[in-house]
Image (cartoon, rainbow, N blue to C red):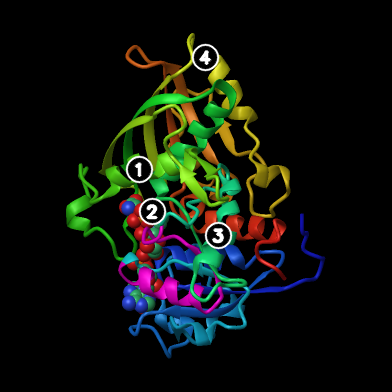
Amino acid sequence: MHGVPAGTKVYVGVLGATGTVGQRFIALLAGHPYFVVHALGASTRSTGKPYFQAVHWKQTDPIPNAVRELVVQPCSPEHFLECTVIFSGLDADAAGDIEGAFRAADLAVFSNAKSYRRDPHVPLVVPLVNTHHFSIIHQQRSLHSPPLKKGFIVTNANCSTTGAVIPMAALERAFGPIESAMITTMQAISGAGYPGVPSLDIFDNVVPYISGEEEKMEWETLKILGGVAERDDGAKHFDMHSRTPLRISASCTRVPVLEGHTETISLRFAHRPPPSPQQVRDALSAFTPAVQALGCPSAPRHAIHVHEEPDRPQPRLDRNYLAGAGVSVGRVRQCPVLDIKFVVLVNNVNIGAATSSIINAEMAILKGIVEL
Ligand SMILES: NC(=O)C1=CN([C@@H]2O[C@H](COP(=O)(O)OP(=O)(O)OC[C@H]3O[C@@H](n4cnc5c(N)ncnc54)[C@H](OP(=O)(O)O)[C@@H]3O)[C@@H](O)[C@H]2O)C=CC1
Ligand SMILES: N[C@@H](CC(=O)OP(=O)(O)O)C(=O)O
């Protein structure tokens, strides 16, 4: 493992710096022990302006002084060559080409966009679950033409996928494979970026459709909970099929909440008899991800908080649990159709987006994949 010596400063760039996720990167990085925001990128609507003029700042703390006056750059690699790490909160329409160009310029990109999540050589990493998928990065670099020394892309998952997969991974670790999952989400409006859903559509309302969301949850979960396998010739691939088959049905809705996605999850385990609700509570509470055990500075000190109160978790009360880096679970009980059901609350902008990228980058440094 490669620690970060005290006093080291690691320059980072933020793409999509003016957006919902980009702003959260800047807010979170202000207190980081070694990452220092060095360059910002956004669209032509913002470039050439000092950050404070380009952004509609919607965070509770003021814009950090060190970032306020930085001039927003076009999202092209030549403006970011001094950065060791690139965090991307780019709109998915722009992310594919831009992130690809940054990788080709041998830069390490940690993305929130969906563009590369299905790429067979790009790890889709929820840092509390599957940082072992970083093992494919060497191959991603070697298959690039010309082969890369430092560049790669790692993506986060969809924010609702992240909320579901953390307790699911904890339960698979304790009780073996999950066979089926029924998930219903109640997603905050910040998930749709800024300015997002029109107030006349969401106020006093629930919208029972978020384009592409259910398919992403159903597919991404399989990649994240699958392994990385090696063929006879040494080539690695994500293995979504040799595990016990996992069937997932997701129903996604948008609700008038600002931040924090709530999800109800019902599960059936492959092994019989299934665990009791108390065994499930204990396993969730005891879950210790590698990023926590290895001391990544942004990892939550306790990944899953299990509520005993019957009316928790709630977005307004629980979205800032451990600075939004952990998830909250409650109402763990028997399911009369499957085995177990519970409610999870995930901060969609923190562990559902910016915090995940930051922990991923911390872990990539610890593993020596990003060299300082
Ligand atoms: N919000 C959330 O909870 C989550 C979001 N994500 C994903 O993260 C990404 C960012 O989401 P979010 O912050 O909500 O989106 P926003 O719409 O709030 O922000 C988008 C950002 O992308 C920039 N941008 C747009 N088009 C271009 C372009 N052509 N070239 C360069 N920059 C461009 C915008 O710059 P400008 O201001 O100059 O237009 C802005 O900085 C998306 O891919 C989203 O799917 C993932 C998980 C959760
Ligand atoms: N679609 C999510 C946020 C998001 O942007 O997801 P993705 O990165 O998978 O497109 C939401 O609306 O809450």
Q: CA distance from mark 1 to mark 4?
A: 26 Å
Circles 2 and 1: CB atoms closer than 8 Å: yes
The amino acid beneath tag 1 is Trp
Q: Which residues are magenta?
A: 93-116
Residue at (51%, 38%) from the top-left corner? 166
> Is residue 166 shown above or below 238?
above
Closer mark to the observer between disc 1 and disc 3: 3
The amino acid beneath tag 2 is Arg
Residue identifier under label 3:
139
Q: CA distance from mark 1 to mark 3?
A: 23 Å
Lower position in the chain sequence, tag 2 or tag 3: 2
Number of residues whose C-alpha sits closer than 10 Å to that of mark 1, classed few (under 14), some (14–19) or many (20 or more): some
Lower position in the chain sequence, tag 4 or tag 2: 2
Lower position in the chain sequence, tag 3 or tag 4: 3
Can you give x and y, in whole percent of width and height, for residue 18 in the image?
A: 42, 73
Decide which of 355, 245 is in the foreground and name it: 245
Which label was assigned to residue 118?
2
> Is residue 353 shown above or below 39?
above
Number of residues whose C-alpha sits closer than 10 Å to that of mark 3, classed few (under 14), some (14–19) or many (20 or more): some
Classify mark 1: helix, strand or loop: helix
Residue identifier under label 4:
275
* Quarter of the rendered image showing ligand 2: bottom left
User: Which residue extends farthest bottom?
Assistant: 48
In the figure, residue 292 lies in which quadrant? top right
